[in-house]
Amino acid sequence: MIFTRRRFLQTSLTALAGASAGLWPWPGRAGQIHQVELTAQESLLNLGAGPEFKAYSFNGQSPGPVIRVREGQRLRVSLKNSLPHPTTIHWHGLPVPNPMDGVPQVTQAAVPPGGRFTYQFTARPAGTYFYHSHFGYQLDQGLYGALIVEPARAAGGWDREEVLLLADWVLADGGGAAPVRRRPPGGGMMGGMTARSAPGGPLLEPYYSGYAVNGRIYPAVEPIRVKRGDKVRLRLINASSATSYDLALAGHRLTVIALDGQPVTPAAFDVVRLAMGERVDVEFVADNPGAWLLRARDTGLGESGLAVPVLYQGAARRRPTPPRFHQGLSLATYWDLAAAAPRAHPAGEPARWHRQVLGGGMRSPYWSINGRVHPDSERLAVEPGDKVRLSYFNRSMMPHPMHLHGHFFRIVNHRLPPERWLVKDTAVVEPMRRLDIEFVADNPGHWFHHCHNLYHMGGGMANLVIYPGARGPFGGET
Ligand code: C2O
Ligand code: CU
């Protein structure tokens, strides 16, 4: 997952030679088609912290290959399903045409075992995204990977860039990654996770204890190697199913430059927070030689196991110094950040205003919006061109990272003019709090809208935004 400019150049040359298959592809020009083959399959995973266990992968690896394209390029992904279960791929955060969105029973029929499906869309806008299965609990079984859209005109100034995918895993007693078995919906045995379930009902969140970065658990994780003076960019992607992280890098502050792939006015913080489905791009200047740890805060649930060393060239080899999460550290919140450049947002009253009361939990595996549980949830009707507001009222004791497919939304922030409101696709509604978002209905179809805690989604915290007249994959309203 590490690359330097030199490696960039090399892969670019191999791509020109037409031999790029399997290598990290250099993004091509706008208009050029970027072809990727992904096979979803069962594989043995080794997290570097115990015995191998059986899970799911793309092309034999979890995370799957990094897909890197140029803004405006066509991306064509041909998916082959070699799993014993149906599957799909969703392009998290990218506003793709509705039939390409990868939500089973909403935008397409799931791809059956042995089947194929070709996803094709123009990659736009630039930013840090990821792709993942949207079928059942397959995200938690390893089916995810990074999707990076490079700006049409090379932005830059970074000496190094790292893509860091964060994931939560269940480890067996006694340490290591020995499988804890459970029966996934649809039958069959899977390793790497555990959960309790009412017979036939949704699953309760499993007890995670292993936190991987790019598929490896510290200390087996690949370190970030820097030279003094380097300007380093980290693209952090939280692909975890049910864990959010507060991250700090010892000896350095992190300058936030983008949230959910969309540029923000750069601002430096001690701690950045990243919920399920969110991405944050940060940069730092390597001006404090040594061996340091980028690590998650310990909230008592074990997230502090998520760590990556940052090693300066020539630093004496020793244990990396962890950050100390003392009181008074600055935390990057939505209210401390603004869109980098003013981005038009229609003024005035929204054409539609939907109240979304988030409830559930308390030992129940059911989670609801306005008291209803998906698929018996409501349909939020919108017309093309509408400005739509969603007001979330979280009446539960858990945070909910709410994700809307097919659109970016703005986080309503009365301290800023609307043109500077954050542009996001996933936003956390804290326990017992309210949060408002607004979006412009500019992408007709049937769009999934749900909590990105996989177990809350599976427990029903989901509904559909529907453009009347837009046809579903099964020839009509879904
Ligand atoms: Cu990241 Cu509905 O998905
Ligand atoms: Cu939730």
Image (cartoon, grey):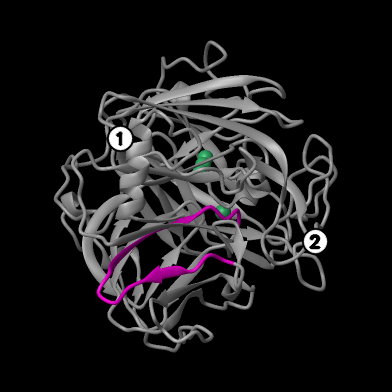
Residue 48 seen anywhere in this rendered image of the structure = yes
Reply above or below: 76 against 333: above
User: Is residue 276 covered in magenta?
Assistant: no
Q: Is residue 237 left or right of residue 454?
A: left
Which residue is farthest top? 475
Quadrant of the rendered image containing residue 125: top left
Q: Is mark 1 within 8 Å of ligand 1?
A: no
- Distance between mark 1 and mark 2 Cα atoms: 40 Å
- Residue 326, x across and y down, in percent: 44, 89
| Residue nearest the observer in this picture, 218 or 172 | 218
| Residue nearest the observer in this picture, 429 or 218 | 218
**Rendered residue at 33%/40% (across/down):** 12
**Rendered residue at 48%/33% (across/down):** 21
Query: What secondary structure is marked by label 2?
Result: loop
- Residue 198, x across and y down, in percent: 82, 48
Residue 438 seen anywhere in this rendered image of the structure = no
In what quadrant of the picture does the C terminus appear? top right
Query: What secondary structure is marked by label 1?
Result: loop
Q: Amino acid at mark 2?
A: Ala
Q: Residues within 10 Å of mark 1 (few under 14, many from 20)?
A: some
- Residue 56, x across and y down, in percent: 69, 43
Q: Which mark is residue 178?
A: 2
Q: Is residue 223 left or right of residue 337?
A: right
Q: Which residue is mark 1?
A: 124
- Residue 464, x across and y down, in percent: 50, 32
Reply above or below: 21 against 146: above
Q: Is residue 364 left or right of residue 262?
A: right
Depth check, mark 1 against mark 2: the one in front is 2
User: Is residue 235 covered in magenta?
Assistant: yes
| Residue nearest the observer in this picture, 380 or 30 | 30
Pointer 1 or 2: first along the chain: 1
Q: Which residues are magenta?
A: 221-242
